[in-house]
Image (cartoon, grey):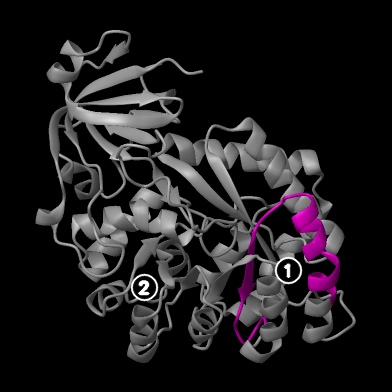
């Protein structure tokens, strides 16, 4: 049983509580608790309030007093990453910036299939080592919950290798890793059958093992001209839904159709959405699907951003994730990307912070984090400032100095 602890004082605690899951948020709607302390026990938040008052009533509570000015946010949630992979795609990046098209890069041996080839060559131990390194980097940047996709195996055996590596990594890192099966990333080049044949094989052979080994409860698919059509993916998602999996979709990255599939299947989230028109924006806003913007992919590919402002103004729920992957989004810095998206899409600080905390948690179907309130997971981060506005103002150059996971200090810049 964990010792009950009082941590503080924080000049400002921004709990991100009492805010709507959907629609626009103005900065004046943000609650700011000043000179505050946080009491945690058994990994959960028990109370937040005036630090001095909490100290006076702290009998039996271990006090962890902070020196200097600090502002506290909930631990960040990155709801879309691909940090389990082998190799590198640095050559793709150089070719793309030199003006080569996606097709030209693929013909030259690059693209997703390049990463598939390198990931298949990697041992389980190598995948665990790489995923651990990247997960710990995210943690130091304030990300305490990280979604991690498979999708670079593209066979039953290789997808299992990836998902087992993610599961093994999760046992040995402080951040929570939420695995997602993306076996429907593209049709493997070495598969002799059709898209429908491949999807049927995966759903029949892989899905039962995912349940049996509790490797993931999330199924994703890339709906795009270069991957799978809405028609091809329908029986795949039907099987996943029937087996009780949550659905998420790579949608509307280069062409539209994926967001409609996400709505039809009551997916938890539709991610990418760079190609979404006002029609898709309004359909998403009327649904319960979380729209997840991936500014890292826009930066990496040099393409338009997700129409985040339109999504919020239409009443949609907007999460923001890094899409950290070796090809289109190698930066992997959630806070930097979210700040940049906010600049280009004219998002309030409140909207950006919501997108990487409680709205991102909702995109993972997690209702126990992303806010600082009684009963929530004790995941929070501290910045050396007395003004929360400094965090996004510095566009990702201002990192957390401390990270707490389940109420335990797991990163301290000073040590």
Give how far across and how far down residue 218 sits, in percent. Answer: 62, 61
Q: Earlier in the sequence, mark 1 or mark 2?
A: 1
Residue 194 locus on image (x, y percent): 83, 86
Q: Residues within 10 Å of mark 2 (few under 14, many from 20)?
A: many
Residue 287 seen anywhere in this rendered image of the structure: yes
Quadrant of the drawing holding the C terminus: top left
What residue sits 79% from the left and 72% below the top?
A: 203
Q: Dot 1 lies on which element? A: helix
The stretch drawn in magenta includes residue 183: no
Q: Residue at x 73, y 76 (%)?
A: 239
Secondary structure beneath label 2: loop
Residue 181 in the image: state x and y as whole percent: 68, 61
Q: Is residue 320 above or below residue 65?
A: below
Q: Residue 222: within the magenta?
A: yes
Q: Is residue 185 visible?
A: no
Q: Which residue is mark 1?
A: 113
In-front residue for pair 11/204 = 204
Q: Is residue 49 above or below residue 323?
A: above
Residue at 71 percent of width and 39 percent of height? 168
What is the C-alpha distance between the residues marked 1 and 2? 25 Å
* Towards the viewer: 21 or 307: 21
What is the x, y in percent for residue 409? 42, 23
Q: What's the mark number on residue 305?
A: 2
Query: What label does residue 96 carry, if any?
Result: none
Q: Is residue 326 left or right of residue 187?
A: left
Reply above or below: 46 against 229. above
50 on left or right of 157 = left
The magenta region covers 201-228
Q: Hey, which quadrant is residue 124 in on the image?
A: top right
């Amino acid at each position: 049983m964990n010792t009950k602890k009082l941590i503080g004082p924080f000049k400002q605690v921004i709990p991100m509580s009492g805010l709507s899951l959907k629609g626009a948020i103005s900065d004046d709607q943000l609650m700011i608790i000043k000179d505050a302390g946080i009491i945690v026990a058994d990994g959960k938040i028990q109370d937040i309030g005036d630090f001095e008052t909490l100290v006076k009533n702290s009998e039996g509570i271990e006090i962890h007093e902070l020196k200097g000015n600090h502002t506290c946010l909930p631990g960040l949630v990155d709801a879309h990453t691909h940090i389990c992979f082998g190799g590198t795609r640095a050559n793709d990046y150089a070719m793309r910036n030199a003006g080569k098209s996606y097709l030209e890069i693929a013909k030259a041996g690059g693209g997703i299939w390049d990463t598939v080839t390198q990931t298949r060559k990697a041992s389980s131990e190598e995948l665990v080592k790489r995923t651990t390194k990247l997960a710990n980097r995210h943690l130091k940047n304030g990300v305490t919950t990280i979604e991690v996709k498979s999708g670079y195996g593209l066979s039953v055996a290789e997808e299992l290798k990836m998902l087992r590596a993610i599961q093994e990594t999760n046992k040995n890192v402080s951040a929570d890793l939420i695995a997602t099966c993306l076996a429907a990333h593209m049709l493997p080049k070495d598969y002799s059958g059709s898209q429908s044949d491949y999807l049927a094989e995966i759903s029949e052979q892989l899905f039962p093992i995912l349940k049996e080994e509790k490797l993931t409860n999330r199924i994703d698919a890339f709906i795009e001209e270069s991957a799978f059509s809405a028609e091809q993916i329908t029986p795949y998602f039907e099987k996943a839904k029937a087996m009780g999996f949550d659905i998420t979709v790579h949608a509307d990255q280069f062409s539209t159709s994926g967001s409609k599939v996400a709505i039809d299947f009551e997916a938890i989230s539709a991610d990418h959405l760079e190609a979404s028109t006002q029609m898709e924006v309004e359909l998403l806003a009327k649904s319960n699907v979380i729209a997840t913007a991936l500014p890292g992919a826009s930066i990496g590919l040099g393409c338009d951003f997700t129409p985040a402002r339109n999504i919020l103004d239409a009443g949609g729920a907007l999460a923001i994730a890094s899409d950290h992957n070796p090809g289109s989004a190698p930066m992997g810095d959630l806070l930097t990307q979210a700040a940049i998206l906010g600049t280009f899409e004219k998002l309030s600080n409140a909207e950006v912070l919501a997108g990487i905390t409680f709205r991102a948690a909702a995109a993972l179907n997690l209702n126990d984090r992303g806010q600082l309130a009684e009963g929530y997971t004790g995941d929070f981060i501290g910045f050396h400032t007395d003004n929360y506005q400094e965090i996004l103002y510095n566009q990702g150059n201002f990192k957390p100095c401390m990270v707490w996971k389940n109420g335990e200090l797991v990163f301290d810049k000073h040590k």
